[in-house]
C-alpha cells in the first residue's frame, strides 16, 4: 500500500471530484424518492440502502475524497474499500478504485473494477469508454468491440467511437460492419473524400471491384466542378488494366483544365505504362518547367529523370541542361539547386563548377547553412582565407546562433595575422553559446582566445580563457599543453602545470611538443634528471626539432652536468632560430635575432645556463 503514496502524488483529483458529484446524487436518491427528467437515464446504485447506510456510505466516500486531496492516498484507498463493504453495488466506487489500480500498475484489478462499474451502470458512457480502453490495452479486442458497440448505441453521434469500432472491425475483419460503420459516420459528417476512399478500401479488400469503382464514381458526380476526382477515376482505371478508359478520363480533364497538374502527372504514368518513352520524357520536362508543379513533385520527377538517365548510359549534360532550365525560373526554395549540387558532387565534377551550384543555393536562400559550410570548407582547403571571411561573415548575420561560422571567420583572421579581428570574432561567437552548443567547438574558441591573449601579453585574461576552455572540455589537449607551458614560463602554479602537461603526454606519448613542455616544467621544478628523460624522448620523437626544443635540451643538459652537450644544443638552437626567422619573413628579423639570440650567445660564451629573467 505504500506504493500508492508515491504513485498518486500527482493523481487526477478532478476525476475523483467528478465521482463525488455522482455519489452525492446517488446517496440522496437512496433515501429520497427520485425525480427523473424526461429522456435522462437514471443513475443505477444497485442495492437499495436504508437511511443509515446511505449516510454512512456518503460520509466514508466524502472522507476518502478529502484524504485523497490531502495526499493521504493509503487512507483514501482503504476508505474506498470500506465503501464497498457498505454498498457492494456502488459503481462509482469501483470506477474510482480502477483509477487507483491503474496508477499502481495492477491492470487486471483495474479492468475488473471498471468492468464491474459498467455492469452495475451500463448506461454510463464514462464507464463504458474506460472499459473499452482497458480491453484494448489488454488486447482483448472482441470484448472491446462489445464495450464500444454499447457505447455507440448510447451515444450514436460520437464519431470518434465509431472510428474506434471501424479499426476493431478491420482487425476481425468484418467488412459488412465496416461499411455499416462508415455509413453511420457519413450520415453524421456528410459525404467526403476520406469516407469514400475508406469504403473503396473495404470493397478492394473484399475483391468487389464493381462497388469500389461505384463509390469513386459517386464522389466525382457529387463534385462535378472538381476535375481531380475524374483524375482519380482515371487512376483507378489505369491501375485496374483499363488504359483506354483511363486515357479518356485524363483527356477530358486536360481539355477542360490544360494546366491540371494532377492530370499531367497521371498522363506521365499512362505514357510509362504504355512504354511511350519519348512522350513520357516530354511530359516529365513539361511538369518540371511548369511553375504550378509542387516542389515535392518536381524533386521526385527530377530524381526519376536522373535515375532513368543513369540506366540509359548516364549523359550528365542532358541532366545539367534540364537543371539549368528549371533554375532559370524564379525559385521560392533552394531544394532544386541543392539537388543539382548534390548530383554534381556524386558525378565528381570539378570543384569550381560545384561551387557555382552551391552559390546558386545561397542566392536563393542566403540562410542555407549546408551550402555555406560546403563552400567554406573548400575555401579553407584552398587556404583562401579572404574568401573564408567573405563567406563566414554573412553566415554569422543570417544564422547568428550557428557558432561554426564564427569559428571559420576567427581562424581565417588568425591565419591572416589579424589577431584583434580574430579575438573580436571569437568573443561574439562565445556570446552565442548555450547548453546545446558543440562542446568541442566552444572549447576551441576559448583555447584560441587564450593563445591570442597570451601573445598580446594579457596573461591573466589568457589564463581565464584557458579555464573556460577546460570547463567546456576538460581533455582539450592543445589547451592543456599551452596553458601548462605558459604557466611554466611565468614560473607560477607549477604543480597545476605539471598535472595538465602530464595528461597531454599520457594522451599522446610520442608528441615532441607535449614531451618538451613536460620536460620544461620538470626543469622549472628543479627535477633535472627527470627532465632529461623527457627532453630526450622529445628529441627522439621529432626528426627536425625546432629551436625552442633544442634550446631547452641545452638548458637541461647543462643542469645535469653535461656542459659540452649543452653548448652543442645551444649552438644548434642559434642556427635554427635564424633559419626560422628567415622562413617566416618577419619584419625587422635581423634586429629581433640580435635581441632574442643575445641570451643564447651568452650561454655559449660562458658555457653555462643563464636564466631568462625577462620572461618572469
Image (cartoon, rainbow, N blue to C red):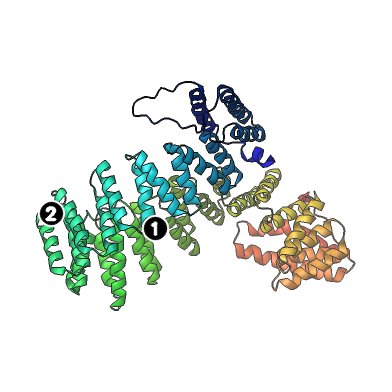
Residue at (30, 49) in percent of width and height: 181
Q: Is mark 2 on a helix, strand or loop?
A: loop
Residue under label 1, please give it. 171
Q: Which of 561 and 178 is in front in this view?
A: 178
| Residue 351 drawn above or below residue 367 | below
Estimate the spatial distance between the alpha carbons at disc 1 and disc 2, rounded to whole Å: 42 Å
The residue that label 2 is drawn on is 257
Q: Can residue 210 be seen in this view?
A: yes
Query: 10 Å neighbourhood of mark 1: few (<14), some, or many (≥20)?
Result: few
Q: Where is residue 257 in the image (x, y as percent from the top left)?
A: 12, 54
Taking 289 as reference, is 1 left or right? right
Q: Position of residue 578 (x, y in %)?
A: 68, 65
- The residue nearer to you, when weighing 260 against 548, is 260
In what element is the residue under mark 1? helix
Count of numbered badges drawn on the protein: 2
Q: Which residue lies furthest to the bottom in this view?
A: 313
| Residue 548 in view of the camera | no
Which residue is at a point 71% across and 53% down the rendered structure image? Answer: 483
Q: Where does residue 386 sit, x and y in percent of width and height?
A: 47, 56
- In the rendering, at what x and y percent does residue 566 appear? 83, 68
* Marks 1 and 2 close (CB-CB < 8 Å): no
Amino acid at each position: 500500500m505504500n506504493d500508492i503514496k508515491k504513485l498518486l502524488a500527482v493523481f487526477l483529483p478532478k476525476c475523483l471530484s467528478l465521482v463525488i458529484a455522482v455519489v452525492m446524487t446517488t446517496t440522496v436518491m437512496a433515501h429520497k424518492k427520485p425525480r427523473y427528467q424526461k429522456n435522462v437515464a437514471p443513475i443505477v446504485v444497485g442495492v437499495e440502502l436504508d437511511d443509515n447506510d446511505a449516510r454512512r456510505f456518503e460520509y466514508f466516500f466524502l472522507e476518502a475524497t478529502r484524504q485523497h486531496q490531502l495526499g493521504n492516498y493509503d487512507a483514501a484507498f482503504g476508505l474506498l474499500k470500506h465503501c464497498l463493504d457498505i454498498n457492494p453495488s456502488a459503481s462509482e466506487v469501483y470506477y474510482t478504485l480502477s483509477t487507483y489500480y491503474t496508477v499502481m500498475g495492477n491492470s487486471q484489478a483495474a479492468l475488473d473494477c471498471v468492468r464491474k462499474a459498467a455492469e452495475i451502470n451500463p448506461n454510463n458512457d464514462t464507464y463504458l469508454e474506460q472499459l473499452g480502453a482497458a480491453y484494448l490495452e489488454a488486447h482483448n479486442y472482441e470484448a472491446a468491440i462489445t464495450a464500444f458497440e454499447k457505447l455507440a448505441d448510447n451515444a450514436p453521434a460520437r464519431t470518434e467511437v465509431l472510428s474506434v469500432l471501424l479499426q476493431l472491425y478491420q482487425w476481425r475483419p468484418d467488412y459488412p460492419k465496416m461499411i455499416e460503420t462508415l455509413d453511420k459516420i457519413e450520415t453524421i459528417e456528410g459525404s467526403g473524400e476520406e469516407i469514400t476512399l475508406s469504403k473503396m478500401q473495404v470493397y478492394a479488400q473484399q475483391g468487389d471491384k464493381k462497388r469500389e469503382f461505384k463509390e469513386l464514381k459517386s464522389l466525382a458526380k457529387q463534385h462535378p466542378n472538381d476535375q481531380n476526382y475524374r483524375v482519380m477515376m482515371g487512376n483507378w482505371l489505369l491501375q485496374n488494366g483499363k488504359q483506354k478508359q483511363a486515357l479518356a478520363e485524363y483527356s477530358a480533364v486536360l481539355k477542360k483544365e490544360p494546366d491540371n497538374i494532377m492530370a499531367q502527372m497521371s498522363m506521365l504514368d499512362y505514357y510509362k505504362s504504355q512504354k511511350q518513352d519519348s512522350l513520357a520524357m516530354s511530359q516529365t520536362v513539361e511538369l518540371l518547367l511548369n511553375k504550378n508543379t509542387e516542389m515535392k513533385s518536381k524533386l521526385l520527377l527530377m530524381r526519376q529523370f536522373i535515375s532513368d538517365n543513369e540506366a540509359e548510359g548516364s549523359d550528365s549534360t542532358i541532366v545539367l541542361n534540364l537543371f539549368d532550365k528549371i533554375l532559370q525560373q524564379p525559385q521560392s526554395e533552394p531544394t532544386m539547386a541543392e539537388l543539382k549540387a548534390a548530383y554534381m558532387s556524386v558525378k565528381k565534377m570539378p570543384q569550381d563548377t560545384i561551387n557555382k551550384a552551391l552559390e546558386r543555393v545561397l542566392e536563393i536562400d542566403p540562410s542555407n547553412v549546408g551550402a555555406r559550410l560546403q563552400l567554406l570548407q573548400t575555401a579553407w582547403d584552398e587556404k583562401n582565407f579572404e574568401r573564408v571571411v567573405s563567406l563566414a561573415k554573412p553566415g554569422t548575420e543570417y544564422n547568428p546562433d550557428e557558432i561554426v561560422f564564427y569559428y571559420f571567420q576567427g581562424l581565417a583572421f588568425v591565419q591572416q595575422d589579424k589577431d584583434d579581428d580574430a579575438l573580436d570574432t571569437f568573443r561574439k561567437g562565445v556570446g552565442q553559446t548555450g547548453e546545446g552548443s558543440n562542446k568541442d567547438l566552444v572549447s576551441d574558441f576559448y583555447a584560441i582566445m587564450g593563445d591570442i591573449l597570451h601573445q598580446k601579453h594579457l596573461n591573466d585574461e589568457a589564463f581565464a580563457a584557458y579555464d573556460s576552455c577546460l570547463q567546456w572540455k576538460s581533455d582539450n589537449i592543445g589547451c592543456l599543453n599551452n596553458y601548462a607551458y605558459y604557466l611554466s614560463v611565468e614560473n607560477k602554479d607549477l604543480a597545476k602545470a605539471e598535472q595538465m602537461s602530464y595528461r597531454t603526454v599520457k594522451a599522446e606519448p610520442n608528441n615532441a611538443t607535449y614531451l618538451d613542455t613536460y620536460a620544461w616544467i620538470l626543469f622549472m621544478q628543479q627535477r633535472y634528471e627527470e627532465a632529461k628523460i623527457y627532453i630526450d624522448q622529445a628529441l627522439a620523437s621529432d626528426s627536425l626539432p625546432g629551436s625552442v626544443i633544442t634550446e631547452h635540451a641545452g638548458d637541461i643538459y647543462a643542469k645535469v652536468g653535461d656542459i659540452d652537450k649543452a653548448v652543442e644544443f645551444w649552438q644548434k638552437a642559434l642556427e635554427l632560430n635564424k633559419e626560422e626567422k628567415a622562413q617566416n619573413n618577419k619584419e625587422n628579423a635581423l634586429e629581433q635575432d640580435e635581441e632574442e639570440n643575445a641570451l643564447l650567445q651568452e650561454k655559449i660564451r660562458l658555457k653555462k645556463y643563464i636564466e631568462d629573467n625577462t620572461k618572469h
